[in-house]
Every structure is written in structure tokens, then in C-alpha cells.
Image (spheres, rainbow, N blue to C red):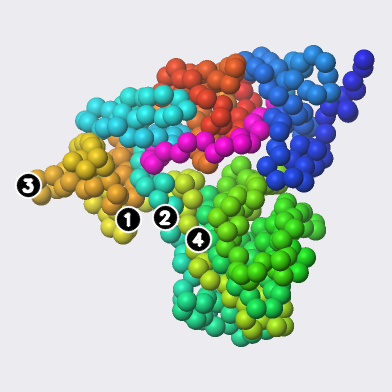
């Protein structure tokens, strides 16, 4: 049996149709994207410095692919969501680890991870530590007057206990500081059949024109999630056969879980998960949310309980790169207050939570701050801090975080590698969304 190259290699958009399908949550294959842009799908069996072994449904024996030709590897979506940690550590080389903090002393930080075990990391390699990632920190709560929104078109009003209402065709748009991972909730209530669109991660405040964003629509045809693009027509990600007249309560609670890094969007309706879908295009980077009533009969239609949260915190906040590259340590609390000094210890407090001890200039005693009140700890940089070699691969984790790796190998669901700071480690692939090879690496 002869298999031509073109029967195995497909453009990424074609792979999206065959691998992801139209049924929610049906990503069943790993994807290897070659440096030339071609794509292979199947089940990755092994990886080492020279070869990736892929079991393809199109060949009776596994394919051996030279590692030098591989751009990145995306692993199939997992049926269950991996465990999540409440803290996130950024190392001196920029790597980000979701983790559980055990303790900090004057020499090192002890952490534990479910996907790679425990580590003891020297302080000179610590850059920042974020707390409270599982608390889904609030970015915006929709309970203010429409006049406070960035853009307002149409006759909008806000009623406590009912939400936003537009009596005709109209748009409300607001620019926020959106994180990479988002948790969006809103309740839709109607008397007559609604015609409503909600755009999120939008690059501007336009409700109908082409732009990079996601769009949820709910009307007499049902509920739909689409990927909008600036240079082509919308791509349908999800189509739910749920029509307004079929819902006796005339109310629908919508929850969207958006992971922009992996392109995974999960939908819950009235608390029940309806599926997840994968966006294969480059993630939209916009910060706008847009409410768009598309019906002239807007009376009796309300958007209530709108909240946008930072879902499992995605990435380190932008301020960490620019403002706090200082020699002293810094504690930023959840209210935006900053304390400088020397981070002494992190230990478990009397109630089981973490407590941070910070020595401050001119203070007689160290300040002791509960972890639940802390947003981020920043570790001062020493001018003589050691430089760290870059790895030739980068592993990206489901839900956020990444590690640079040197010559990883994969076998039986485990990635074995040497990290430039952590040393030898073994990573469970159920925590991994993608592996990317750095360009111009041997």
C-alpha cells in the first residue's frame, strides 16, 4: 500500500474540519505542524532529539518524522479538566509554573506540582509569585449605568434586579483589561423572541463589522458561537439547537470559559456543560466586550448578572515586566497597595493558609500578611544573578504556563527532560497543550 505525501499532509484549516468536527468536544487527535506549514494528525507515541513517532489512521505502521522538520506539536484535548493550582511562579528565565507553594526561606522556595512533582528552587531564580488563581478574580461586574460604557448606541437602560435593556436596535461596548483566560457569565431574560449578539475579546467597539473576536448569538434559530475575522467571513465554532420558544422559563444562564492560548472555548447553559470547541486561528487579542440587541422589539429583553473574571489567571500581569525590576522585593496586595522590603519566609498559618513575612525598612518587626490578601510577590533582581541557558523546546500547559526544555523525550504519556533551572524532571502530558521547537536549534 502506498500513501502519498499529500494524503497525509493537510493545511491546518482542513485539519480543523476533520479533527475537530462539528460535535462539541471531539478533538481526538494530536497535531504535528511542520515548519513548512503542513500538518499531520494521529496519536503521538514517542519523541526524542531526532524523531517523533506518530501513529496515523492512514498508515498500518507508525510514522517516524525527523524532529528538525517539526514546528510545534498540539496534544488532543482532554475529556476532563486537569487539576489546577492556586499559585503561579515565574522564574528568572520567564518560565511560568502553576504550583502549590510549600515554603520560602532565605535560600530557596519549595513548591509542589501535580504534573511534575516537587521542586526546591534557589531564590536567585525567582522572579514573581501570584496568589489566588483559583478565585477567578473579578475583572468587571455589569451593574453600572449605560452612560459609563465606552460606546452606547440605542435606548439603553439599567434596572437593578433586571439588568440591561435596549428598547430598539442598539449597542453597548466596553474596553476592559482582559486576561488570557476568561470566565464570562450572563443571564438572558425575554418576553418575546430575542435577537441578541455578544462579542468578546474584540479589537474594537463595532458590533457587526468584521474584526478579530468571538461572537455568541441567540435568536429564533438557536444559539451559536462564531469566530469573527477581519479578512474573511465568520467561522462557526458551535451551533446549539436551543430555541427561545422551547424554554418555558424564558431565561437562560450562559457561562463561557475562554482559553485564548489554546483556543479552547467551553460553554455551560443553566449550569450544565454543553461542550467545548477549539479555535485553530491565532487568538484574538482584543479587550472589548459588546452587547448588541438586533431586534426592534427590545422591550422585555434583559441582559443580567454580567460578570467577567480572570479564569485561572492565564499569564503574569503586564506590570511585572516594566515597573518592578528592582533590587528590593515587593508585595502587591489585592487592593493594589505595594509594600517594599525583603521577603523573609512563606509558611502555613494557624488556619492552614499561607502567611508571608516581609521585613520593611525602619520597621521594628516584620509584616505578616495572609496569602489570601496577596495578589503578587516580586523578587528583587541581583545584578550578579546567573544567566540561564535557553531550552530548545517550549512546553505550554493547559490553562496557562510554560517551561523551556532541553532535548525532551516522550514515552507512555510522560515527558522526560532537563530544565535549565529545575534540573531533571518528568512531566505528565495530560497537563500539556503544546510543544514548540525553537527555530535554529539543532
Task: Tell me the CA gap for discs 1 and 3.
Answer: 25 Å
**Residue where numbered disc 1 is placed:** 334
Disc 1, SS: loop
User: Which mark is in front, 4 or 3?
Assistant: 4
**Residue where numbered disc 2 is placed:** 137
Residue 348, x across and y down, in percent: 23, 37
Task: Tell me the CA gap for discs 3 and 2.
Answer: 34 Å
Residue 54, x across and y down, in percent: 73, 20
Task: Specify the quadrant that holds the N terminus.
Answer: top right
Disc assigned to residue 241 = none
Disc assigned to residue 364 = 3
Q: From what the image shows, is residue 73 above or below residue 410? A: below
Badge 4 density bin: few <14, some 14–19, many ≥20, Cα 10 Å = many
Q: From what the image shows, is residue 431 above or below residue 241? A: above
Residue 297 shown left or right of residue 3 in the figure: left
Q: Nearer the viewer, residue 243 or 312?
A: 243
Disc 4, SS: strand
Q: Earlier along the polypeptide chain: callout 4 or callout 1? A: 4
Task: Tell me the CA gap for discs 2 and 1.
Answer: 10 Å
Residue 379, x across and y down, in percent: 31, 40
Disc 2, SS: strand
Query: Are circles 2 and 1 on residues that touch, CB within 8 Å?
Result: yes
Amino acid at each position: 500500500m502506498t500513501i502519498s505525501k499529500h494524503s497525509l499532509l493537510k493545511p491546518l484549516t482542513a485539519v480543523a474540519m476533520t479533527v475537530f468536527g462539528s460535535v462539541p468536544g471531539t478533538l481526538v487527535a494530536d497535531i504535528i505542524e511542520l515548519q513548512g506549514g503542513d500538518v499531520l494528525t494521529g496519536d503521538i507515541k514517542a519523541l526524542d532529539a531526532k524523531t517523533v513517532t506518530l501513529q496515523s489512521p492512514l498508515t498500518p505502521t507508525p510514522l517516524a518524522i525527523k524532529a528538525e522538520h517539526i514546528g510545534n506539536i498540539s496534544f488532543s484535548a482532554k475529556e476532563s479538566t486537569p487539576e489546577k493550582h492556586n499559585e503561579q511562579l515565574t522564574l528568572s528565565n520567564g518560565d511560568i509554573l502553576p504550583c502549590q507553594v510549600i515554603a520560602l526561606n532565605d535560600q530557596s522556595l519549595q513548591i509542589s506540582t501535580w504534573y511534575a512533582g516537587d521542586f526546591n528552587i534557589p531564590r536567585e531564580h525567582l522572579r514573581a509569585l501570584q496568589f489566588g488563581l483559583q478565585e477567578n478574580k473579578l475583572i468587571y461586574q455589569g451593574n453600572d449605568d449605560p452612560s459609563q460604557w465606552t460606546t452606547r448606541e440605542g435606548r439603553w437602560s439599567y434596572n437593578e434586579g433586571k439588568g440591561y435593556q435596549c428598547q430598539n436596535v442598539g449597542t453597548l461596548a466596553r474596553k476592559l483589561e482582559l486576561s488570557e483566560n476568561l470566565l464570562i457569565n450572563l443571564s438572558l431574560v425575554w418576553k418575546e423572541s430575542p435577537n441578541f449578539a455578544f462579542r468578546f475579546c474584540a479589537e474594537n467597539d463595532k458590533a457587526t463589522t468584521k474584526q478579530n473576536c468571538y461572537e455568541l448569538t441567540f435568536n429564533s434559530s438557536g444559539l451559536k458561537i462564531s469566530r469573527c475575522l477581519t479578512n474573511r467571513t465568520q467561522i462557526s465554532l458551535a451551533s446549539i439547537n436551543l430555541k427561545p420558544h422551547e424554554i418555558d422559563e424564558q431565561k437562560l444562564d450562559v457561562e463561557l470559559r475562554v482559553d485564548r492560548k489554546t483556543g479552547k472555548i467551553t460553554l455551560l447553559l443553566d449550569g450544565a456543560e454543553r461542550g467545548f470547541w477549539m479555535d485553530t486561528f491565532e487568538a484574538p487579542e482584543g479587550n472589548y466586550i459588546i452587547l448588541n440587541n438586533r431586534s426592534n422589539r427590545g422591550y422585555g429583553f434583559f441582559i443580567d448578572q454580567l460578570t467577567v473574571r480572570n479564569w485561572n489567571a492565564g499569564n503574569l500581569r503586564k506590570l511585572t515586566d516594566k515597573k518592578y525590576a528592582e533590587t528590593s522585593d515587593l508585595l502587591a496586595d489585592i487592593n493594589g497597595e505595594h509594600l517594599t522590603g525583603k521577603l523573609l519566609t512563606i509558611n502555613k498559618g494557624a488556619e492552614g493558609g499561607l502567611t508571608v513575612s516581609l521585613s520593611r525598612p525602619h520597621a521594628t518587626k516584620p509584616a505578616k500578611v495572609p496569602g489570601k490578601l496577596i495578589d503578587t510577590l516580586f523578587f528583587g533582581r541581583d545584578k550578579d544573578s546567573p544567566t540561564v541557558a535557553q531550552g530548545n523546546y517550549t512546553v505550554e500547559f493547559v490553562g496557562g504556563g510554560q517551561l523551556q526544555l532541553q532535548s525532551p523525550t516522550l514515552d507512555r504519556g510522560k515527558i522526560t527532560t532537563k530544565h535549565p533551572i529545575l534540573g531533571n524532571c518528568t512531566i505528565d502530558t495530560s497537563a500539556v497543550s503544546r510543544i514548540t521547537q525553537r527555530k535554529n536549534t539543532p
